[in-house]
Amino acid sequence: MDILAQLIVSGISVGMIYGVIAFGYQLTFATSKTLNFGQGEALMLGALVGLTTINFLIATGMGTLLAFILMLPIVLIFGMMQGAVVEFLGVRQAMRTKSEAGWIMATIALGIIFKNLAENFWGRDALRFPSPLPEQALSVGAVRIQPMEIAILLGALGLMIAVEVFNRKSIYGKAVVATALDRDAAGLMGIDTRLVITFSYALSSMSAAFAGVLVAPITLTGAAMGGALGLKAFAVAIIGGLSSGYGVVVGGMILGITENLTGYYISTGYKDVPGLLLLLLVLSVKPAGLFGSTAIKKV
Amino acid sequence: MANKTFLLAILASTALVGVSVSASAQSGAPIKVGLSGPFTGGSSSMGVSMRDGVKLAVEEINKAGGVLGRPIQLIERDDEAKNEVGVQIAQELINKEKVVATLGFINTGVAQAAQRFYQEAEIPVLNNVATGSILTNQWPDQKINYVFRTSANDIIQSSMIAEEAITRQGFKKPAILADATNYGQLGREDMTNALAKLNIKPVAVEKFNIGDTDMTAQVLKAKEANADVILTYAIGPELAQIANAMAKLGWKVPMIGSWTLSMASYIDTAGPNGDGAIMPQTFIEMPTTPKRKAFIEAYHKAYGGDRMPSPVSAAQGYDSAYLLAAAITQAKSTDGAKIRTALENLETKIEGVVTIYDKPFSAKDHEAISPNIPVMGLVKGGRVVPAHPEDIAGDKAMRVKPKG
């Protein structure tokens, strides 16, 4: 029983990271029906920019926790700018020419370019990210949990709630929702839908960058860190459903927990298999995802 | 006018370079030697230390007049620890640069893929870090083998690990944790064999991928199997994740594993959680002989710092360059076949950093390091120190391959 609890707790924190990245996929898909396939690279850039900033702040004699908090707005703003660049260079052109696959190629290409830039800028080594919280694990009953794992859970939920509240309550958010519901009608109502799409890309990369600095203290930071995470989050987005913000959270947890359970109860060599099986299963039974609503496309 | 001054400056500097070359009294074209290793990426601490060790030795050799009156010129290439890049580099070094021999290889997979090109071209390879047991015996059907090694292979290492854990420290329930690469899986096999010789069966055998960040499942399995020691075959970052997962689960058993537990990426990432890990080392950064003292001082003078990123790689790299230089001198030629014959019948006794090389190779035996040479090292306070200081006390400091 204790072991099961331990595996689930560890799975949840990994799953939340998948969830935040997948949340970013969902944001842009809602407004533009396109995705940023370089989402993993957005995470990696966020983590590396965060690393440079936090090291700079610590060098000025600041405590790690304070430095981490001060670093956050810089990383979030950087993430937004990076997302806007991706939309401007990769997606806008493809949407204007109504290209079906142009944005896929363009966002993958941009992801590769960002990775190469990062390799040149930060090198190819994995770097240690200073942990803002003590690394000593806490005991909750028989379950051991690192403070940073709790921070990941709270931070990820907090960010997603903040974005959702913004979308539902503020006038700008309502423009986003309107565009998501019906882009043409929103345009007729005087909403600059192009700007809204740029904005959704900015929010999407911002969540990825935030996930990057959350996960960095318990792993290592480096140009190669984004690839596997971005891909797994993509699976999560499919499992949870690309139209549901709450689906990706559950999808992330499902994947994180199944990975750990398989690793323990079946074999650590097959850790990644059930997630992919689940992906295939969902695609064949409920293609819109476990929590997605089926869209009827009229032609 | 400005142009003219610039031209004069160029002429003057060319002349200066010319003077400095002739001043070192070396005639003839440089002898080109290839150097292949990962200078970036997860294995770079080993690659860079190896390269710096080789460069240090080559500088010393050139300062003393070079070989056959010619300076050695290193052609350095970064193989990024990728098999396919290693193959490209091998072809470039052989066909374009026309090297007379190549030093290097950190990763067993890269060496396995690249060495066959040297074998075909009849150019000797001194493999100075990669440990896969198969590397010096890749073509058992061919009479002549151009691959030599100056590192302790995995058969030596795995039996040392088993010996240390079972015989010396009395553990009975080892769990093996290895990564899914060639290195990890071949090592796991050697380790299971070494344990079987002591009539011990591991209570758990787990694996993980490079880049895995959560080792909870693997470590929990070892814990639930009541393992009393964890034996590892993996590289730095993932080893650190194992140490961190143990700390997280509040479960601590000793970690004993292959020499990669001495990698800076393990020691630095695991921090205090990594203390106490034990691994075979051919060289520990301590001035136990005058030669070692001089080497350590020269290394830090040239590259700064007070700790080598990977002392073993640096020492083995340094020694491999001296062995090659001695072989070329003895062969009186840069012909690959003649250098190989010279290596197999090396007449000069060379005092290196790791050991004294007295006929280190023969036609049948291409391993310079014998099982008695490495000692166990221990991670303590961010450095590697001897696990059993009595092993290297007094005249045991210099361990030499037995004759025969």
Image (tube, rainbow, N blue to C red):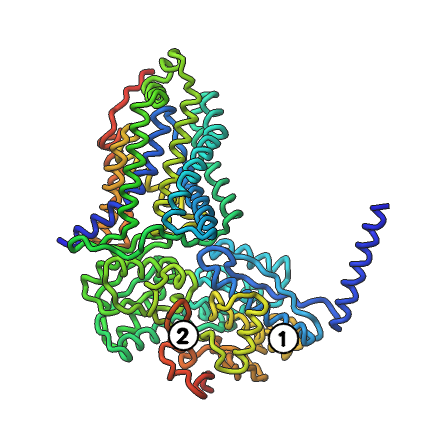
For label 2, the SS is strand
For label 1, the SS is helix
Q: What chain does mark 2 sit on?
A: B
Q: What chain does mark 1 sit on?
A: B
Relative to A81, does residue B299 appear above or below in the rendering?
below
Front residue of this view, candidates B310 and B114: B310
Q: In the image, are marks 1 and 2 on the same chain?
A: yes
Instruction: Please tell me which residue is depicted at 39% across the width and 46% down the height of the picture.
Output: A68
Could you tell me residue B327's position as x and y percent? 60, 77
Q: Answer yes or no: is residue B104 visible.
A: yes
- Label 1: which residue? B328
Name the kind of residue labelled 2 in the image.
Val
Q: Earlier in the sequence, mark 1 or mark 2?
A: 1
Relative to B359, does residue B119 appear above or below in the rendering?
above
Instruction: Please tell me which residue is depicted at 65% across the width and 69% down the height of the picture.
Output: B72
Could you tell me residue B204's position as x and y percent? 23, 63
Front residue of this view, candidates A109 and B181: A109
Residue furthest to the top in view is: A188
- Label 2: which residue? B385
Relative to A23, does residue A69 appear above or below in the rendering?
below
Instruction: Please tell me which residue is depicted at 26% across the width and 47% down the height of the picture.
Output: A150
Front residue of this view, candidates A121 and B317: A121
Residue furthest to the left in view is: A1
How crowded is the residue under tag 1: few (<14 C-alpha within 10 Å), some, or many (20+)? Answer: many
Disc number for residue A249:
none
In the picture, measured across the screen, residue A214 lies left or right of residue B318, that is left
**CA–CA distance between discs 1 and 2?**
35 Å
